[in-house]
Image (tube, rainbow, N blue to C red):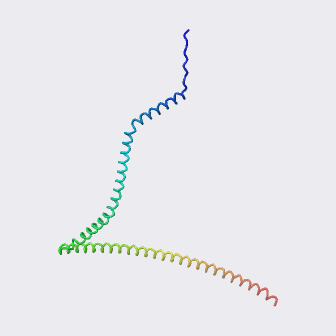
Amino acid sequence: MPTQTTTPRRTSTARSTSAKKAAATRRRRSASTRRPRSTARSTARNSGQRAKAEATGLQVVVQQAERAVLIPVGATLTASDNVVETVRPFVQPETARREVERLQRRVRTNLRKFERRGNTARNRVERRVKRTRTQVERELRQRRNQVQRAVRRNRRELERDFRGVRRDVGRNFDRLTSDVSPLS
């Protein structure tokens, strides 16, 4: 019978631990061989980034300073252009006359517009006042007629009641006098 040799079996935990140790050893060896080169590279990269950041920060400061100067200069130039454009038509007599006529036409046109609008507003107010007056008059007429009808109705009722009371008083008087006459 052949003899069996038994080799100890490794568990997954043991295998995992061995793999971790081997990987750490490889890292240490590769890091020690590559370190001078990567350090030089990272140092160069860091100094380049620092210089770029400083340059960028300096550029921001320069831009802000330029803006502080350029904004008022631009505003002044724009105002100057506006003044020149406004004055230009009035420099020569012929263009000044034309410009004045153009402005007069514009004023006349605007005055006509304002007049029409005022006229329209006046007419609208007059119509509203007339309509309100008519409504008030109609309402007053209706109320006056109602009051007159009520007065006539109440007067008739009072007269009717008065005649009835007078008749009753007359009858009672006649009855009383007829009752009192035999006693005398």
Q: Is residue 168 above or below residue 4?
A: below
Which residue is located at x 77 percent, y 85 percent? 176
In the displayed structure image, the side of residue 125 where residue 94 appears, left or right: left
Q: Who is closer to the viewer here, 33 or 127?
A: 33
Q: Who is closer to the viewer here, 160 or 17?
A: 17
Which residue is located at x 51 percent, y 29 percent? 18
Q: Quadrant of residue 83?
A: bottom left
Figure quadrant of the N terminus: top right
Which residue is located at x 38 percent, y 45 percent? 43
- Residue furthest to the bottom: 184
Q: Position of residue 100 (x, y in %)?
A: 23, 74
Q: Position of residue 122 (x, y in %)?
A: 38, 75
- Residue furthest to the top: 1
Q: Quadrant of residue 171?
A: bottom right
Q: Is residue 30 above or below residue 98?
A: above
Q: Is residue 29 above or below residue 83?
A: above
Q: Position of residue 57 (x, y in %)?
A: 36, 55
Which residue is located at x 71 percent, y 84 percent? 169
Q: Who is closer to the viewer here, 9 or 65?
A: 9
In the displayed structure image, the side of residue 58 where residue 173 appears, left or right: right
Q: Position of residue 6 (x, y in %)?
A: 55, 17
Q: How many marks?
A: 0
Q: Who is closer to the viewer here, 35 or 64?
A: 35
Figure quadrant of the C terminus: bottom right
Q: Quadrant of residue 42?
A: top left
